[in-house]
């Protein structure tokens, strides 16, 4: 069950990866431009600033790896499954909408969707991303955990998640993204 939740959360978050990566880039640039202030306050402050910049760069690399893995998974599973996952999670359609689009019943679409999620998770594992590895690598990404928690709570609201939803999780995060809500 946890494997399905993580797989869904990762696909839900896919559409925000580029924007979050851009935010990380802006944060690195901003910290670098203002690094002269650290020079005036001493070596300890400069080392701290360098450490924060390196952490942001590692975080960006991790998210770029995730983006690449998601795209590899979508290319390697059957086309029909990939279409369902893209239409559901990336395009934000409901399963009923996807069922109508593909001229199948809602019950059939639910079974196809579960099968697509399972195929995607198996492929994630083949690429070295089991649940424990997902938790280890992306467990500190509060915005992604927000999608996981929303799935766990069965999403009481039927509204699609928005960019402000991601910004809220970034804001709540104790990460070094103070202006994350400026998406």
Image (cartoon, rainbow, N blue to C red):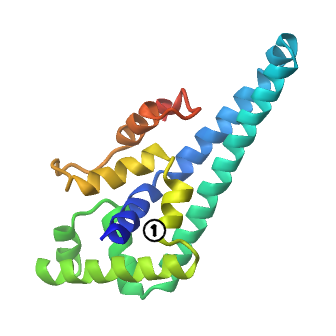
Q: Residue furthest bottom?
A: 78
Q: Is 58 in front, or is 157? A: 58
State the residue at coordinates (56%, 63%).
67
Q: Is residue 55 left or right of residue 17?
A: right
Residue 36 position in % (x across, y down): 84, 18
Say which residue appears at 80% left-offset and 14% top-offset: 37
**In terms of secondary structure, where does tag 1 sit?**
helix
Residue 155, position as x, y percentages in the image: 20, 52
Residue 145 makes an appearance in the image? yes
Residue 42: quarter of image = top right
> Crowding at label 1, few (<14), some or many (≥20) Cα neighbours within 10 Å?
some
Residue 141, relative to residue 28: is it above or below?
Answer: below
Give how far across and how far down residue 17 sits, in percent. 52, 53
Residue 105 in view, yes or no = no
Residue 40 located left or right of residue 110: right
Q: Is residue 12 left or right of residue 152?
A: right
Along the viewing direction, whichever of 29 and 35 lies nearer the viewer: 35
Q: What residue sits right under mark 1 in the picture?
A: 131
């Amino acid at each position: 069950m946890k494997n399905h939740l993580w797989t869904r959360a990762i696909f839900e978050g896919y559409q925000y990866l580029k924007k979050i990566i851009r935010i990380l880039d802006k944060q690195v640039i901003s910290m670098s431009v203002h690094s002269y202030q650290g020079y005036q306050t001493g070596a300890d402050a400069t080392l701290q600033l360098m450490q924060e910049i390196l952490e942001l760069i590692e975080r960006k690399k991790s998210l770029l790896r995730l983006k690449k893995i998601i795209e590899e998974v979508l290319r390697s599973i059957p086309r029909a499954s990939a279409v369902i996952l893209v239409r559901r999670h990336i395009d934000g359609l409901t399963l009923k909408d996807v069922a109508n689009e593909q001229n199948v019943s809602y019950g059939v679409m639910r079974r196809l969707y579960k099968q697509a999620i399972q195929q995607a998770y198996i492929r994630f594992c083949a690429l070295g991303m089991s649940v424990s590895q997902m938790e280890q690598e992306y467990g500190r990404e509060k915005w992604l955990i927000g999608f996981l928690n929303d799935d766990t709570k069965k999403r009481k609201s039927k509204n699609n998640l928005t960019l402000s939803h991601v910004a809220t999780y970034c804001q709540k995060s104790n990460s070094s993204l103070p202006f994350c809500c400026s998406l």
